[in-house]
Image: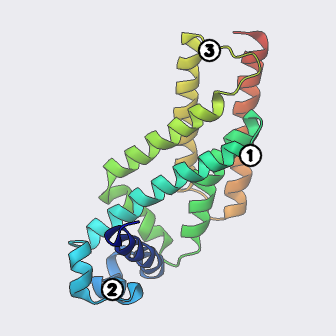
Amino acid sequence: MTPETEKQNQVLDAALEVFLRYGFKKATMGDIADKAGMSRPSLYLVFANKEDIFRAVITRKEEEFCQETDRKFLQCCGLRERLTAVLETWILEPFTLVSASPQAEEILEFAYTFAPDLRKQMLESMESKLLEAMSVDSQGISSKDRELSRTVLARLIAVSTIEMKHSITLPSELQQLLEATVEVHASYLENRDYHGS
C-alpha cells in the first residue's frame, strides 16, 4: 500500500465516523482532520472538499461490499446461502451501521440526493453479485430466457431491498424481510430449475 493510499484510507476511516456522528451537513473538514490525526491543510492535500470525501467513502464501501460478498461466496454452498450473503452484506450490515447513528435519516437522504450516480453504480454492483449468487443451480441450465429472467430477478431484489431501508426502522425487522425475500426468490428459482423451464 502506497503512503498516499494509506493517507486516503486514514481520512476515509475518520470521515465515516464523523459523518455517522454528526451527519453530512454538520460535519466539517476540521472534524475529519482532527479524527484522522492530521492538520486541515494536510487534509486538503488529500481531498479537495467534504463532498469528495463523502463520495470516496461511498465508493470504498462499494468495493468492500464486493470483496466481502466474494469472501462469503467461498463459504456458501447453496442458492439461499448465497442470496442471504448478498443481502446481508449490501443491505442489512450497512443499514445496521447507519441506523445506529443519530443522523441516520440525514445521511441516507443526502446520499440519495447528492450522489445519484454512485447510488446507481452501487445498485448495479449489487445486482451483479445477485446474478453471481443465482448462477448456482443444480442442473446448470443457462438458456437465454433463464438469464434474462435472472437479470430481472436480480434487479427486482436489489431495488426492492434497497427501498426497504426507507420504510423500516429496526434492523431486526429488516432482517426478517430480507429472509423472506431470500425464501421467495430462492423457491421460485429452484422451482424453475427443477422443472427445467
Q: Amino acid at mark 2?
A: Ala
Q: Residue visible at 54% across and 68% down?
A: 98
Q: Which mark is residue 33?
A: 2
Q: CA distance from mark 1 to mark 3?
A: 23 Å
Residue 105 appears left or right of 48: right
- Please indicate, yes or no, whether residue 110 appears anywhere in the rendered image: no
Q: Earlier in the sequence, mark 1 or mark 2?
A: 2
Mark 1–mark 2 distance (CA, rounded to whole Å):
39 Å
Q: Which residue is mark 1?
A: 75
Give how far apart the Cα atoms at labels 2 and 3 are: 51 Å
Element type at mark 3 = loop
Checking the image for residue 142, the label placed there is: 3
Q: In the orientation shown, which residue stands out farthest toward the front?
A: 2
Residue closest to the eye, 134 or 173 = 134
Classed neighbour count for the residue bearing mark 2: other residues with Cα under 10 Å, few (<14), some (14–19), many (≥20):
many
Query: x, y (%) of residue 76?
Result: 74, 42
Residue at position x 57%, y 31% from top?
Answer: 131
The kind of residue tagged 1 is: Gln
